[in-house]
Image (tube, rainbow, N blue to C red):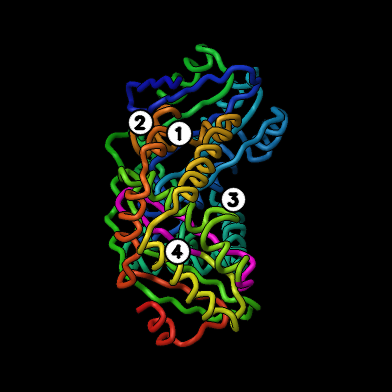
Amino acid sequence: MYEKRVLPNGVRLISERIGQVRTASIGIWIGNGSRYEPAALGGISHFIEHMIFKGTEKRSARHLAIAMDALGGQFNAFTDKECTCYYMKLLDTRIKTGVSILADMFMNSRFAQEDIELERGVVLEEIDMYEDTPDDVAIEKLFERCYAGSALGRPILGTPETLQTINSEAMHAYVSEFYRPHDTVVAISGSFTEDDLDYIADLFSAMTGEGHNAPTLARYTPSLVLREKEIEQNHLCLSFPGVPLLSEQRFQMNLLGSILGGGMSSRLFQTVREQNGLCYSIYSFGTSHLDTGLLSVYAGVGPDSERRALELIIRVLRDFCENGPDADELARCREQVKTTLLMGLESTGTRMMSIGKSELMRGTVDPIETVLAHYDAVTAADILALARQTFDFTKASLSVVGQPDTADSYKTLLL
C-alpha cells in the first residue's frame, strides 16, 4: 500500500511498507535530465550527479565516503534524459543517519572548482568508455540523428567541448534553477517508521523554488547513421516511432517488444540466431519519453552475415504485421512480463525505483493489481493493430557501427 505526502513546498514523499525485511531503499528523484539542458551546458546534469559525492558545506568528500561505508549500505546515482536519481539502501535502524547524509549532498553540495577540475577527467574517461562499447555507440548515434535539433538527441554525458565550459558558478546556478521542489520526489520502500517519514519530511521542507521544469518538444526524423569503427562485428540498431511514456498503449507495446525480441523464445531470437546462426546477440527494446518513444531492434553480426540478418529481421517484422501473435506467444510473453514484475516486488530497491519514477513522471503509482490487469486486458488484436501502426518502414531508422555497407544498400533493404 502506497502513502503519499505533499510537503508545503511541493516536494512529494511517497512510501511503501514491506513486511519481513530489515532494510529500506530511499531515492531522491528530480525531474531534470539532459533534455532540460541548454546546448552550451550539455552534460551538466550528469556532471552534477558526480559532484554531489564530492563534498558539502559540512562534509568533505572523504567524510562522505567514510560515513557511507560506515553505514554498511549502498549509495549511488544515475542520470537519464528526463530525470536524475540519488539513492541508497541500508538497514532500517540507520535510516535517519543515511538520509541526513543524502539530503545534505543533494541540497548543500559545494561544487568546489578544484574538485570539478579533477572530476572532469573522470567524466571524459566515461565518455571514452562508451566509445569502446559499440552497441552503445550504435544506439546513441541513432538517437542523436533521430532527434537532431532537440535536447533529447544530445548525449547524457555531454561532449568534451561542453564539459570544458562547466564550472562551479554554472553548477550552482543550474541547481538553483532546475532542482525545484515541485519536481522532486523522495521515495522509500521497505522497513521504516512514521518517525522516519517525519524526519525525511523535515529535511526536505528546506528546499526552495517555484514552478516546474518544461522540456523542449522533440520531433522524430527517420535517419540512417553509418559509423566506421575498427571492430570485428557490425552493430545494428533498427528503430521505429513507439509510444510516449504516458500512452495508454504502453502495455501493448511492452508485450509487442517481448514477443518479437524479449527472450530466447522470441521470434527474432529464434529466427536470426537459433534457426540461421547469424548472430550471438539480438533483442528488441522500447524507449519512452514524455512526448515520444521508439521501439528498436539491436543485433551484433559479422559483416559477411549482416545483409542476411537484416533481411530476416525485416521479414519477421513484416510477417508479424500480417497475422499478429499466436495465442501461445501472447500467453507466454504476458506471463513472462507479469512474472518479472512480481519478482521485482521482492526487492526494496526495485520497488523504490518503480514508485519513485512513476510518481515523478506520471504523478501517480498504480497498485500492482491494476498493472497486472492492464496486461491481462491486452488482446492479440490490440498487438496486431499496434504492430501495423509501428512498423511503417517509411519511418524506419537504422544505425550501423563497424564496417558498414553503402547507404544505398541499406535504403534498398528498408524500402
Q: Report the front residue among 49 and 310.
A: 310
The N terminus, quarter of image: top left
Image side of residue 118 versus residue 332, left or right: right
SS at mark 2? Answer: loop
**How many other residues sit within 10 Å of disc 3, few (<14), some (14-19) or many (≥20)?**
some
Select label 2 or label 1 by which is in front: 2
Q: How far apart are marks 3 and 2 (CA)?
A: 38 Å
Q: Report the front residue among 287 and 93.
A: 287
**Hey, what amino acid is under mark 4?**
Thr
SS at mark 3? Answer: helix
- CB atoms at circles 2 and 1 under 8 Å apart? no
Residue 141: x and y in percent read 46, 69
Residue at 39% from the left image edge and 44% from the top image edge: 251
Select label 2 or label 4 by which is in front: 2
Image quadrant where residue 23 sits: top right
First in residue order: circle 2 vs circle 1: 1
Is 163 situated above or below 344?
A: below
- CB atoms at circles 3 and 2 under 8 Å apart? no
- Which residue matches tag 1? 356
Instruction: Determine which of the numbered discs, if any, sits on residue 364 in the image.
Output: 2
Q: Distance between the residues labelled 4 and 1?
A: 30 Å
The C terminus, quarter of image: bottom left
Residue stretch rendered in magenta on the structure: 276-297
Instruction: Determine which of the numbered discs, if any, sits on residue 162 in the image.
Output: 4
- Which residue matches tag 3? 115
Image quadrant where residue 24 sits: top right
First in residue order: circle 3 vs circle 1: 3
Q: How far apart are marks 4 and 3 (CA)?
A: 17 Å
Residue 104 appears in the picture as rendered: no
Residue 163: x and y in percent read 49, 61
Instruction: Determine which of the numbered discs, if any, sits on residue 383 in the image.
Output: none
